[in-house]
Image (tube, helix red, strand yellow):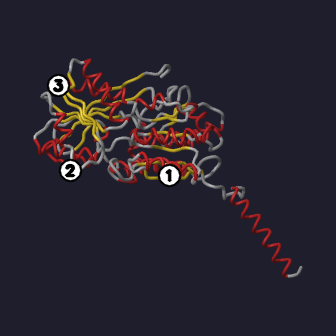
Amino acid sequence: MTSTRKLRRMMVVLSVALLLLAAGAVPGLAQPVRIGALFPMTGDLGAFGKPFYDSAMLAISQINAQGGVLGGRTLELVLADSQTNPVQGVAAAQRLVNVDRVPAIIGAASSGVTIPVATSVTIPSRVVQISMASTSPEITTLNDDDFIFRTVASDTMQGLVLGQLAKRLGYSRVAVMHVNNSYGLGLAQNFETSFVAEGGTVTARVPFDQEQVSYRGELDRAAVGNPEALVLISYPESGITILRQSLEGGYFDKFMFTEGMQAPEVVEALGEALEGAWGTGPYSAETEATERFRTAYEAIHGTQPATAFMYETYDAAFVIALAIEKAGEATGPAIRDAIRQVTNPPGEIILPGEWAKAVELIRQGADIQYVGASSPVIFDENGDIAVATIGIWTVEGGEIKVVDHQVVGEFEGF
């Protein structure tokens, strides 16, 4: 064989090998399965971004350490920053779907980002979207062809508990300030319904835009009517500004919050001024599932921060992976159709971290039910969780401490 023919043959072999590699057809060289993470690494919810990422990556690392998905393929998390902004969030989601070709996305965090991402990107593209933190009731009624899920309780649940808590604290007249988006409006409405049912009065309900320099005008309106406390439905960056200006101007010194302000950065910024403040937020009751998450997380990162939605983020990642394995393929419609098959009863219980066990049962054709770190993760017909625990927390000794909780919702057979 001449040197020219040898060279041509080598080029043909190399070309075929490259084509097989690109197609994932070479044993041991299968392409990774990618899923998206649309997290607020910056912006008003930037304090939550890293804990979200660390929680999702815990699930990803456990899955890969136990053999990966679909016969040994690596599961890869592709991170995009929503910037806590609907325009930037939609652009980031478009990149995840159109460039990175992900069949499923974890996120977004704020309802004001999740809803436009769903309506303009994931639903039209037939990509599954599981939010770990968006609580607006508006998400329940989206015309989503069953592509939108969430591992966090709707504000219809949290608003009920928040209204009852205000009454328990002895308040009869409160003002509400809420971020002017789907999250803030929905939670404010549900809180007012609950508080009024308890015999209370909302003296004012004042919306505000994010990241303003001054909120004194809004505080002026909220203070009308002699309210006893301010219920602040906000995110950390804007919320810290509002609290400082409230204290400096003598508007309010008693506060109630929702989970958007349940971040250590808020307490650190305001110090003793927040001592004795109260709030509500999604909560993971102490179970074997929560302990498994906590132990695994702390083994990598040390002490777990008192940040909301970490458990919900982990569960969203694990549920997507289970659905991919159950479906036998990583496409949006297949993941959608498999999700309730791996989460809703009946089935053998799978706890956080039990990936190898789940894979073996799926291969045997057995039914499984994932019981998550955040909740049982039972999805109803709208993609909402049917059973949730709402935590009641307070600021004590400069720390956020959950002191009580309430289970809301029900599901037949659980």
Q: Earlier in the sequence, mark 3 or mark 1?
A: 1
Q: Nearer the viewer, mark 1 or mark 2?
A: 2
Q: Name the residue beneath numbered marker 2.
A: 269
On residue 61, which mark appears?
1
Task: Give left or right: position of 220 versus 191.
Answer: left
Residue placed at 54% from the left, 53% from the top?
Answer: 76
Q: Is residue 112 above or below residue 162?
A: below
On residue 50, which mark appears?
none
User: Mark 2: which amino acid?
Assistant: Ala
Q: Name the residue beneath numbered marker 3.
A: 173
Q: Earlier in the sequence, mark 1 or mark 2?
A: 1
Which element type, helix, strand or loop, lies under badge 3?
A: strand
Task: Give left or right: position of 149 versus 290.
Answer: right
Q: Residues within 10 Å of mark 2 (few under 14, many from 20)?
A: some
Residue placed at 42% from the left, 26% from the top?
Answer: 387
**Image coords of residue 151 (percent x, y):** 45, 35
Q: For the residues labelled 3 and 1, say whether their Cβ atoms are less than 8 Å apart.
A: no
Task: Give left or right: position of 350 versus 3.
Answer: left
Q: Front-most of 124 and 10?
A: 124
C-alpha separation, residue under disc 3 versus residue under disc 1: 49 Å
User: Mark 3: which amino acid?
Assistant: Arg
Task: Give left or right: position of 5 versus 257.
Answer: right
Residue placed at 35% from the left, 48% from the top?
Answer: 48
Q: Front-most of 210 and 282?
A: 210
Q: Nearer the viewer, mark 2 or mark 3?
A: 3
User: Mark 1: which amino acid?
Assistant: Ser
Q: For the residues labelled 1 and 2, say whether their Cβ atoms are less than 8 Å apart.
A: no
Picture quadrant of residue 325: top right
Residue placed at 14% from the left, 29% from the top?
Answer: 228
**Image coords of residue 383 (percent x, y):** 50, 30
**Image coords of residue 217 (percent x, y):** 19, 40
